[in-house]
């Protein structure tokens, strides 16, 4: 069965391209958001299999959204997609048990992590 995904990034082009690519590879994109607050709202409304989320966004960072989403569903599958490669960021994600995909990313890597 196809995985359902929501894509959250403050860059609209990234969201659009990501969503189109995922759809082409049989992954059902059921929502798009552009900040942390909309990510939490979309998660509650759509209950996706996977959340792809940027970390550095206005109106609620990715970390804000991840914590809220994990409070709603501790087993939620969240994947961080960010250009922030700092040790502090990697350490925070590790503690939250969130896989990290570095920007610029390889789409085949994204697909395999979602389907994995």
Image (cartoon, grey):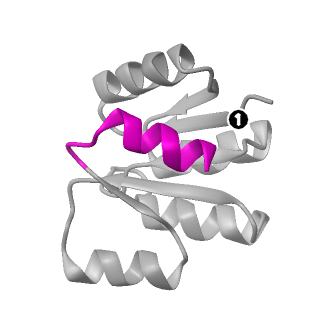
The residue positioned 57% from the left and 45% from the top of the image is 114
The mark tally for this picture is: 1
Q: Which residue is mark 1?
A: 3
Image height of 15 relative to 10, above or below: above
The range drawn in magenta is: 103-116
Q: Quadrant of the N terminus?
A: top right
Of helix, strand and loop, which one carries label 1?
Answer: loop
Dot 1: within a 10 Å radius of its alpha carbon, few (fewer than 14), some, or many (20 or more) residues? Answer: some
Side of 10 where 44 appears, left or right: right
Q: Position of residue 103 (x, y in %)?
A: 23, 47
The residue positioned 58% from the left and 71% from the top of the image is 67
Q: In which quadrant of the rendered view does residue 88 lie?
A: bottom left
Q: Main secondary structure of the magenta part?
A: helix
Q: In which quadrant of the rendered view does residue 102 lie?
A: bottom left
Q: Position of residue 46 (x, y in %)?
A: 76, 36
User: Which of the pair 78/57 is nearer the observer?
Assistant: 78
Residue 107 in the magenta stretch? The answer is: yes
Side of 69 where 81 appears, left or right: left
Side of 55 where 7 appears, left or right: right
Image height of 46 relative to 17, above or below: below
Image height of 45 relative to 13, above or below: below
Q: Position of residue 76 (x, y in %)?
A: 71, 60
Residue 10 in the magenta stretch? The answer is: no
The residue positioned 72% from the left and 45% from the top of the image is 49
The residue positioned 35% from the left and 84% from the top of the image is 91
Side of 45 where 39 appears, left or right: left
């Amino acid at each position: 069965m196809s995985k359902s995904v929501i894509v959250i990034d403050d860059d609209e082009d990234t969201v659009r391209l990501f969503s189109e690519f995922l759809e082409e590879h049989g992954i059902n994109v059921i929502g798009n958001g552009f900040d942390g607050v909309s990510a939490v709202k979309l998660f509650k409304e759509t209950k996706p299999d996977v959340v792809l989320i940027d970390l550095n966004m206005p109106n609620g960072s990715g970390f804000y959204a991840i914590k809220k989403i994990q409070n709603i569903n501790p087993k939620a599958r969240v994947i961080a997609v960010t250009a922030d490669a700092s040790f502090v960021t990697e350490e925070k994600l590790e503690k939250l048990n969130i896989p990290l995909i570095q920007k610029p990313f390889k789409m085949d890597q994204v697909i395999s992590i979602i389907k994995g």
